[in-house]
Image (cartoon, rainbow, N blue to C red):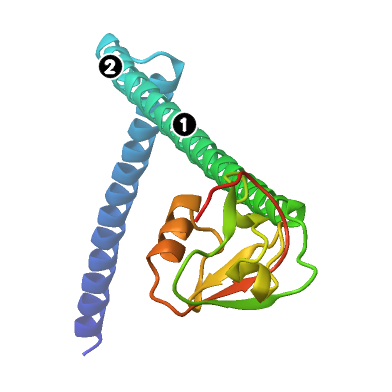
Amino acid sequence: MGQVDLNIHSTFSATEDVDDDIHEVQLQQEIELIQSLHAARMESIDGGTPSSISRMAEEAEAIIPKASEEEEAAEAMKQAKAEAKAAAEAKKKAAAAAAKQAKAEAKAAAEATSDAVMESPPPHRTLVATFGPGPFGMRLKSDSRTLVTTIGTVDDGSQAMEQGVRPGSVILEVAGALVQGLEYAEVKRLVVGAERPLSLLLAMPAGDADVV
């Protein structure tokens, strides 16, 4: 019984020795692999073989043009953005200038109209004169600058005189139609061609005489 136990113990010891040997071999292999990798890395850093140096040079040459192209593209994009911004600003300034010019022209036109109206002498009174058949007995005058038609002269004993029409009266309405702003020829046509009795709304002021 004791012999058997010794044999078993010997077997275990032999097994343990084999396991230790395998472990030692594996450890040595790992150390050699690490050393090999380290040597390869140092070789690459310190100069390396001609093939490795050539490979690194090719990689560098491939990287440099790519970086240059990217830089040129970025610069082109920057330039395009600057040009677009400048064009937008120029367009905005042109629009603002055009709007300012239009506003100034509208203001000038309004002031001119206002001045023309202010330059027209204000009427002292209004009169509605009604004319029957026969001559009016008055002369018309025009002011082409202000588009005002007035009474130039009034004949003694005429319908105009009897109605109280006075020289300088401004014709405002003909048969109820407003004639301010119409050309002289149009006002005269309305007065001469109207049916009788004809009513004229008159105020006061001036121009060249014309018989009607």
Q: Is residue 85 left or right of residue 62?
A: right
**Which residue is situated farthest in the right direction here?**
124
For the residue pair 197 and 44, the one nearer the viewer reads as 197
Say which label, 1 or 2, has the lower sequence index. 2
Q: Residues within 10 Å of mark 1 (few under 14, many from 20)?
A: few
Could you say where residue 45 lies in the image, as x and y percent from the top left?
Answer: 44, 21
For the residue pair 151 and 117, the one nearer the viewer reads as 151
What residue is rendered at 54% in x and 48% in y? 210
Could you say where residue 196 lies in the image, as x and y percent from the top left?
Answer: 42, 77
Query: Which secondary structure lies at badge 1?
Result: helix
**Which residue is situated farthest in the top direction here?**
50
For the residue pair 52 and 204, the one nearer the viewer reads as 204
Q: For mark 2, what is the residue?
A: 58
What residue is rendered at 77% in x and 63% in y? 122
- The amino acid beneath tag 1 is Glu
Q: CA distance from mark 1 to mark 2?
A: 38 Å
Which quadrant is home to the N terminus? bottom left
- The amino acid beneath tag 2 is Glu
Q: For mark 1, what is the residue?
A: 83
